[in-house]
Amino acid sequence: DCVLAPTGEGEFRVVFGYRDSELEAAELRDRALAVGFQGTEIARDACGRVRVAVDDVPSREVGEEVIRQARTVDLHPTLEQEG
């Protein structure tokens, strides 16, 4: 699977989005960084897509709080389980 739905314990990632190119991903990453989401990085997922995310989120609760904060600045991330 390319995306693991958040279940159980472990580490999570907050995904700001997937883009077709690293250039498009860099724009989204820079936007997330500019509004304070430190640690936002670009990486390829297991299916070769370009992902913009903050990895190593320690709990589902922390991830959900990051998502709430992101929505206040017109970003719409999702939560994924790290595999």
Image (cartoon, rainbow, N blue to C red):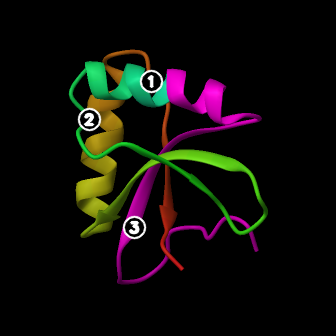
Q: Residue at x 36, y 27 (%)?
A: 32
Label whose residue precedes the other's in the sequence (2 or 3) = 3
Side of 76 relative to 1 (left or right):
left
For marks 3 and 1, the one nearer the N-term is 3
Magenta segment: does it hold 24?
yes
Q: Is residue 47 left or right of residue 57?
A: right
> In the rendered structure, which segment of residues is drawn in magenta?
1-27
* Amino acid at circle 1: Leu
Which residue is tagged 1? 75
For the C terminus, the quadrant is bottom right
- Determine whether the residue tagged by mark 1 lies in a helix, strand or loop: loop
Nearest to the eye among marks 2 and 3: give it.
2
Q: CA distance from mark 3 to mark 1?
A: 18 Å
Give the image location of residue 72, x and y in percent. 31, 19
**In magenta stretch: residue 10:** yes
Residues 37 and 78: in front is 37
Is 13 on the left or on the right of 49, as rendered?
Answer: left
Horizontal and vertical percent position of residue 62: 23, 57
- As rendered, which of 27 and 80 lies closer to the eye? 27
Please state which amino acid type lies under the numbered disc 3. Phe
Residue, disc 2: 37
Q: Residues within 10 Å of mark 1 (few under 14, many from 20)?
A: some
Crowding around mark 3 (Cα neighbors within 10 Å: few <14, some 14 to 19, many 20+) is many
Between the C-alphas of marks 2 and 1, the distance is 11 Å
Dot 3 corresponds to which residue? 12
